[in-house]
Image (cartoon, helix red, strand yellow):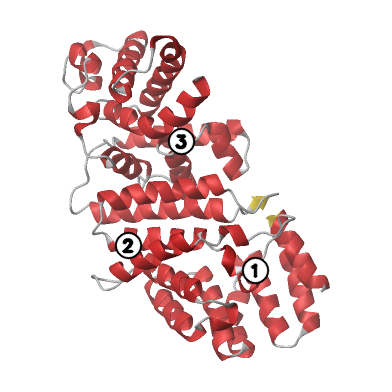
Amino acid sequence: MTEQVGRDVWRHEAPHVLTALLRRSRDFEACEDAVQEALLAAARQWPSEGRPDDPRAWLIRVASRRLIDEQRRRGADAAREQHVAGRVSAADLVAPSAEDEGDRPVGDDTLALLLLCAHPALSDASRVALTLRAVAGLSTAQIAAVFLVPEATMAQRVSRAKATIRATGARLQPPTLDDLPTRLHAVRHVLHLTFTAGHTAATGPHLLDLDLAAEAIRLTERLHRVLPDDTETAGLLALMLLTHARAGARLDSHGDLVPLDEQDRTRWDGELIARGIHLVEAALPVGDVGPFQLQAAIAAVHAEAVTAADTDWLQITMLYRMLDRAAPSPTVSLNLAVAVAMAHGPHAGLAVLAPLLDRDDQRRNHRLHAAHAHLLELAGEPDAARAAYALAARLTQSLPEQRYLNRRSTR
């Protein structure tokens, strides 16, 4: 029962309970501690007393008491208690309002927490870590494993993120119409980084963390339900679904990487592909076309090709050129070079790739050298390709990618 409470209640109810407390206090850490104490109380009491009819209201009530008790133990004066209680009485805290008990639309609490965790004062790494902790419900140990750092290091990072939010005076409240676009941009970026961390691990013995990728999709789906008319959120969700659809074909029986053009496409998830394509087709004709919609459109072109040879590389090249204008980055330039090579020949792709190879900040980018090696191989330059594959293998910290690149080098 304890394990079931921890897995189900924490993931599904904790964001709502945490949000209820954060509406009354700016102390993120104290609120989260109170929620965890309430969860432990549930694990102890529910097996013998039975699960309450409204678990969320029960958890809010217990967590609110714990929060008040902790503030009193710290010697808070009456004014501070007034602030923590959100200018309501202690009795009001103990007996949650109907709003806290679940009358709010599903997803509001998740959106509010996502917006708070994506605060602009935080670094990208801190945003992702705090989102995984507060919204996804991952433990500090699990987040540390994602980032491949010691648990103590991650605990400090999460604590600093909470302290930064407290120091800025940020409140858990709906964003203004003027503020929403900027904050949503940060939320989408955090969710995309989270999905990427699960889809292609940068380091370690495994390429995929399917649970983490699925969690990013779950959170993005909730954001899309709250904001169904936001086409970039729809584009992000479509991109995740179309990319995740290939997960079952990305590894061979030994756990080694299988490149896109060699994957068994019958193992792709047709249902996810259909959902992703539907989202893209619905979003693209509406308003401005953003980067996530363009990336989703590229993924849709790949998904619609029955075989690798059927891929419409001319259309993909066009979409990457649009993406390069909308959101230029080294990654986009790299992918554009590969698309150009497939559409117009390897030498044309190498010409697009050349400026990246001269950039100091890209010299240790193993994916750049891997793409360079692939284009050199296509261009009939095996010695240069072999050296580039070997360099990429030395630079990557992902063991599956390293094995794949070494095989390409010695092939």
Q: Is residue 236 above or below residue 169?
A: below
**Residue hosting label 3:** 133
Q: CA distance from mark 2 to mark 1?
A: 28 Å
**Residue hosting label 1:** 259
**Residue hosting label 2:** 232
Neighbour tally class for label 2: few under 14, some 14-19, many 20 plus, Cα within 10 Å:
many
Q: Is residue 68 above or below residue 279?
A: above
Q: CA distance from mark 2 to mark 3?
A: 25 Å
Residue pictured at 28% horizontal, 22% vertical: 57
Q: CA distance from mark 3 to mark 1?
A: 32 Å
Q: In this view of the protein, which residue sits in the foreground, 45 or 180?
A: 45
Identity, as a three-letter code, of the amino acid under mark 1 = Pro
- Mark 2 or mark 3: whose residue is earlier in sequence: 3
Q: Residue furthest right?
A: 410
Identity, as a three-letter code, of the amino acid under mark 2 = Glu
Name the quarter where the C terminus is drawn. Answer: bottom right
Q: Quadrant of residue 229?
A: bottom left
Q: Find residue 317 and report its horizontal and vertical position in percent.
A: 48, 82
Q: Say which element carries label 2.
A: helix
- Mark 2 or mark 1: whose residue is earlier in sequence: 2
Q: In this view of the protein, which residue sits in the foreground, 405 or 228?
A: 228
Q: Quadrant of residue 73?
A: top left
Q: Find residue 365 and report its horizontal and vertical position in percent.
A: 63, 65
> Along the horizontal axis of the image, is 224 left or right of 356?
left
Answer whether labels 3 and 1 touch (C-beta < 8 Å).
Answer: no
> Along the horizontal axis of the image, is 46 left or right of 336?
left
The reply to whether residue 183 is visible in this rendering is no
